[in-house]
Image (cartoon, grey):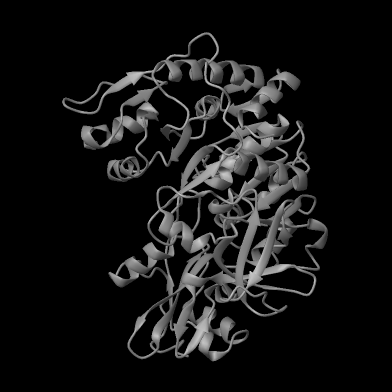
Amino acid sequence: MDAVWNYLERARRDHPAGEAVVHGEARWSWEDLHRRAQGLAVALEAQGVAPGQRVALLWENSPEYVQIYFALHRLGAILVGLNPVNDAAYVMRVCADCEPAALVGQAKFLRRIAPDLDPARVPPLWLLDAPLDAPPGGPRMAQLREEAGDPRAALPAAGDDAMILYTSGTTGRPKGVTLTQRNLTANTESIVEYLALTREDRVMVVLPFFYSYGHSLLLTHAAVAGALVVDNRFAFPRVVLDTMEREAVTGISGVPSTYAILMQKTRLDEHPLPGLRYFTIAGGGLPVADLQRLRGLWPSVTPFVMYGQTEGTARLSYLDPAELDRKLGSIGRGIPGVRLEVLDEDGRAAPPGVTGEIVASGENIMRGYWRDPEETRRVVDEQGRLWTGDLARVDDEGYLYVVGRKKDMIKSGGYRINPKEIEDHIAELPAVVMSAVLGMPDSIHGERIVACIVARAGTDLAAADVTRHLRGCLPHWKQPHEVRFVEDLPRTSSGKIQKHILRESLAGGGMATAGGQLPPGGSEA
């Protein structure tokens, strides 16, 4: 299938009464969603939206988000999904970068940022859900209504640009990842295959749709006419578990912090979820210790460890659950249709056990960064292969083990140190919720190894406990020079830890220690 809209056409034809999106009291069937998306496409076309134009979307997960999403795909417009909690300055930067024809926004978010928007730097603002008066001299605003009829525009072709997803910014300045219709459908078909999704599946959606991982849930379930069960209240994880139980969800997807929070703030073993058949983990490596804890709490639920990047549409690899115990710690092998290699800096295959960079090829690899050919050439070579920036080793059976990010490697005392290895060992301590290890400038060592740890509430974990544990499993040059206990770590809205923000905060004297202090010189290498 080469056009995303065709998923909605097929779901409406084959399963019209089936639930498409459930959100609180709202329950939209595939028939409802198709009718409303087509009606909105007619309205957008009447406003002048044409194939190839960008339209920014500032909306939280909801049936309306999915409606707008498919309406834009029907017209062949390029959807630009934005985090709705972003400030006006960020919205204007994105608008300057991709020059959208319009910004479709939810009233409660537009109301917050509208007074700070410069009319000369943003397009017209359109709303569906509520009237919103424009501030004096502010940007133009209009309310959209669904209209009857059929859009005149032809469906987009496989090679047409479909979306611009701005990277979450875990390592620096966000970039606009440009994905084609075929990028989206190729990745969707692969994920559907290895997860064995059917119309009986009901996924718990706590990841935002503007994030590539959350977006993949939308598409894969549209492809099989399954159901999207949306709950935006993950700040209250017990409420989400109640929703999972009430709606008989069959799957849940999350990043490592999603599951860390569930294990810390709820009693998973006290929530009967008889319909739950699988959970997926991506967006960063879940420490093996946490994965094993989660498997113990959900012994009858199948885990899928996955790996991907926005530049690869969403997913690049998965570990077959049947191989989990034999290949614990691996991200598996390439998904159907994707080839993964571990190459050295000269482009030669790294021998088994030797660290190299993960390089991916397949129909899901992005067209490039929006209007940034120089940055595109840094990561996509002449053969169309994506150099991911992730370091890994491959074993003699072709299974990959991520070592860390090239940009995150710490150079301390003449050694190159992988922070992920230290984080994985810290996670072995039951009192740890999550951690981030990074290098900070140091006149003696080059970089000091700093471990920032979020401890479970009610525990008395001290820095000395951490250093004692690490001394039993790591050599002296990998020992943190400093251990800090913090209440939380800076994360993106999808839950990924932002080390560049953490580094800036530490450099400025922020992230005050909470709990046990490291004894002076107590963890020096």
Above or below — where is 246 with respect to 34? below
Q: Nearer the viewer, residue 501 or 138?
A: 138
Above or below — where is 63 with respect to 440? above
Which quadrant of the figure contains the N terminus?
A: top right
Pick out the residue farthest to the front.
382
Counting from the top left corner in percent of width and height, residue 174 is at 40, 53
Residue 229 occupies which quadrant of the picture?
top right
Does residue 250 appear left or right of residue 456 in this picture?
right
What residue is at 76 percent from the left and 48 percent from the top?
194
What residue is at 39 percent from the left and 68 percent from the top?
514
Does residue 442 appear left or right of residue 413 in this picture?
left
What residue is at 46 percent from the left and 39 percent from the top?
81
Query: Number of labelled discs?
Result: 0
Pick out the residue farthest to the left.
136
What residue is at 74 percent from the left and 47 percent from the top?
278
Counting from the top left corner in percent of width and height, residue 25 is at 57, 23
Kindly tell me whether residue 277 is visible in this rendering: no
Kindly tell me whether residue 389 is visible in this rendering: yes
Q: Nearer the viewer, residue 419 or 312?
A: 312
Above or below — where is 227 with respect to 313? above
Counting from the top left corner in percent of width and height, residue 437 is at 48, 73
Counting from the top left corner in percent of width and height, residue 343 is at 63, 72
Q: Nearer the viewer, residue 505 or 246?
A: 505
Pick out the residue farthest to the top.
148
Q: Nearer the viewer, residue 376 or 72?
A: 376
Residue 392 occupies which quadrant of the picture?
bottom right
